[in-house]
Image (cartoon, rainbow, N blue to C red):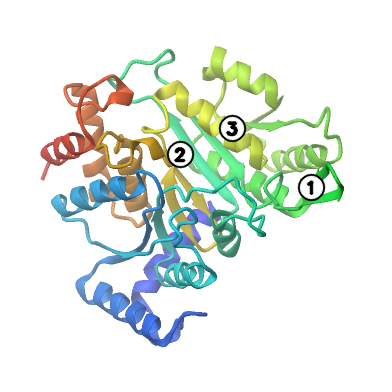
Amino acid sequence: MAALGVGRAAVRGLLRAPCGLRRPLGASAGLQQNHRAKSENAKSEGTFQVTMLPGDGVGPELMHAVKEVFKAASVPVIFDEHHLSEVQNMASEEKLDEVVDSMKESKVALIGKIHTPMEYKGELASYDMRLRRKLDLFANVVHVKSLPGYQTRHNNLDLVIIREQTEGEYSALEHESVKGVIECLKIITRAKSQRIAKFAFDYATKKGRSKVTAVHKANIMKLGDGLFLQCCKEVAELYPKIKFDTMIIDNCCMQLVQNPYQFDVLVMPNLYGNIVDNLAAGLVGGAGVVPGESYSAEYAVFEMGARHPFAQAVGRNIANPTAMLLTAANMLRHLNLEFHSNLISDAVKKVIKVGKVRTADMGGYATSMDFTQAVIGSLDV
């Protein structure tokens, strides 16, 4: 898959290239020196630099769990940490530019959910959306897989949801045409529809998957979703070994609840993907157990599959670190740190399978710290 391959190559090239050739844009001189110093340290120590955004809600607590586990597992990663938050008054163009500059250095990020306020303050596009656009993170991938030892209504699930996330309903194009009438524009383009369809089929090919289902509402949105569906059909013809199917979004939601085993890889526009990500996460245990990732041709961002800040749990030490730890393990695999990736993911799955230490969302009584310590104790080092 081109997006994944380029990302890894970019990371490896980053660690070999002289820092002076990669001048960050839009940052202060001090910030540039700080980035260069971190990159030089990463090179000299044989470690990888990763951009970290803790985000809002329980994000900082989950990142602390990642740091503790990484430290115990001696993971060769250093974090360049930035705080970007609209609800904590830590969001500005300057801070956004700092994150982008850091990404230009590292090519890889681990982020928590950046909460988007519902109040309109003169800017329609949230900082979360603007960051994804600046980095062109067009493909969001959520691998929904049952965890051995944790029983849910459906067990042994293994499906992938791929979502286009740079246009569609989240294009931030809204206006009041006349008083009391709002027009909200959904943008679908041939270029981006073809790109996400190709990404989905490339993913299926690389991962040995046999079927791709395009999810749409072309029966109602005949032009917009019709174009998306047509692009998927055109791309599907280039992959004769992979079965192609289509399904209307409302039927897809019902089928996911009734018989999710019929699905393998699903590809869909922005809003549908956001909804289906969360629905599917609920099938295997909820937002606290499903990892996710987003890709551009150059960058890779790792985040929880179901994006929830879980603000009501802040400071209560009850959030489930599973999804963030599995996400971090996937990030290590992307960096070709296979040993450390398997070490951490195996430890997390072992704790869940044994079943003695589980957070409240999984029916247990353990705190976030209890779970993190159990994972550390299960590291086979």
Disc number at residue 275?
3
Res. 125 in view: yes
Of the 4 image quadrants, the one containing the C terminus is top left
Left or right for 266, reference 19? right
Q: Position of residue 252 (x, y in %)?
A: 64, 22
Left or right for 9, reference 123? left
Left or right for 44, reference 160? left
Q: Is residue 82 above or below residue 380?
A: below
Q: Dot 3: within a 10 Å radius of its alpha carbon, few (fewer than 14), some, or many (20 or more) residues?
A: few
Q: Amino acid at mark 3?
A: Ile
Distance in Å between CA atoms under marks 2 and 3: 12 Å
* N-term mark: 3 or 1: 1
Tell me what residue is drawn at x 54 percent, y 54 percent. 128
Q: Position of residue 369 (x, y in %)?
A: 19, 39
Question: Which one is nearer the viewer's eye here, 83 or 106?
Answer: 83
Distance in Å between CA atoms under marks 2 and 1: 25 Å
Q: Are marks 3 and 1 in contact (CB under 8 Å)?
A: no
Q: Position of residue 143 (x, y in %)?
A: 46, 35
Q: For the residues carrying marks 3 and 1, which lies nearer the camera in this image?
A: 1
* N-term mark: 2 or 3: 3
Tell me what residue is drawn at x 67 percent, y 47 percent. 170
The residue where tag 2 is placed is 308
Q: Amino acid at mark 1?
A: Leu
The residue where tag 1 is placed is 185
Examine the image and state in which quarter residue 231 appears. top right
Judged from the image, the secondary structure of the residue bearing numbered disc 1 is: loop
Q: Dot 2: within a 10 Å radius of its alpha carbon, few (fewer than 14), some, or many (20 or more) residues?
A: some
Tell me what residue is drawn at x 79 percent, y 47 percent. 185
Judged from the image, the secondary structure of the residue bearing numbered disc 3 is: helix
Q: Is residue 307 above or below residue 66?
A: above
Q: Residue furthest right?
A: 178
Res. 18 in view: no
